[in-house]
Amino acid sequence: MDIVQAITLAFIQGLTEFLPVSSSAHLVVLPKILDWHDQGLAFDVILHFATLCAVVLYYRSTLVSIGADFFSSIASRRMQGDSMLAWGVLLGTIPVGITGLLFNDAIEAHLRSFQVVASATIFFGILLGLSDWTNKSLDKSRDMIHGMDIFVIGCFQALALIPGTSRSGITITAALFMGLSRGLSIKFAFLLSIPVITLATILKSIDLLQSPNQIDWLILFFSFAVAFLTSYLTIVFFIRLVERIGFLPFVVYRILLGALLFLI
């Protein structure tokens, strides 16, 4: 893998990891179109770690706050402050974790075709638009998360294992359908990404330790820097954009991207 390929893929990963457009749709399709060789485990690990660092940095104060409330809720045996949000992040990760362990090999073998990616890109893009429209029609959206919200959003997140779905997109979709505000929907979706990306990084790191391939540390350094910076700026840009105009641009983009994939 040369430096151009590495930086291109790192930029795409950083740009699409947190946007509701599916990073897998881009990272599965682009190498096939350009006939690029597989980038290897070390590269996957460093990109996951870069996006993890970006979201943790952005929500660092929130993580400290909900972490303190979480331990207070355990000590007092009742919810404290934003402790429900912390419990939601932990419990909401269980469905995707179980689904990944049981079906990851089958998904890798059978659901990475252009047809599946294109179909998921369009279908879940339309679903995102429908959820945003439904949410706007509510008299008032909620800024507090409940137990049923955690269960439903967690189950929806398991669908993100299908390439083309978008993990952030499907969790935001579920949150909007449940009546959560746009701001809380995005916040919870991004916080949910932390344990998921952490688990993915750990699993890929274990595989990497068992791999005999040599590692090009210079390429990995530049890839990390590009993915980290792009991820962080994307989070900032995305939150501000959605506050102004909603999710429609991403819905339109997904439909066009899916149509292009079908043509390819």
Image (cartoon, rainbow, N blue to C red):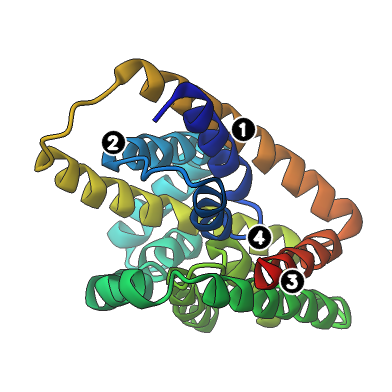
58 horizontally vs 215: left or right: right
Q: Which residue is mark 3?
A: 259
Mark 4 vs mark 2: in front? 2
Front residue of 45/138: it is 45
The percent position of residue 38, horizontal first and vertical second, equals 36, 45
Q: Which residue is mark 4?
A: 20
Secondary structure at badge 3 equals helix
Mark positioned earlier in the residue sequence (4 or 2): 4
Circle 1 or circle 2, nearest the eye: 2
> Which residue is painted at 57% across and 33% down in the image?
8
Question: Between disc 1 and disc 2, whose residue precedes?
Answer: 2
What residue does disc 2 label? 42
From the top left corner, tell me how far across and down residue 35 is, in percent.
Answer: 48, 47
Which mark is in front, 3 or 4?
3
| Distance in Å between CA atoms under marks 1 and 2 | 19 Å
Quadrant hosting residue 136:
bottom right
* Location of residue 173 by image quarter: bottom right
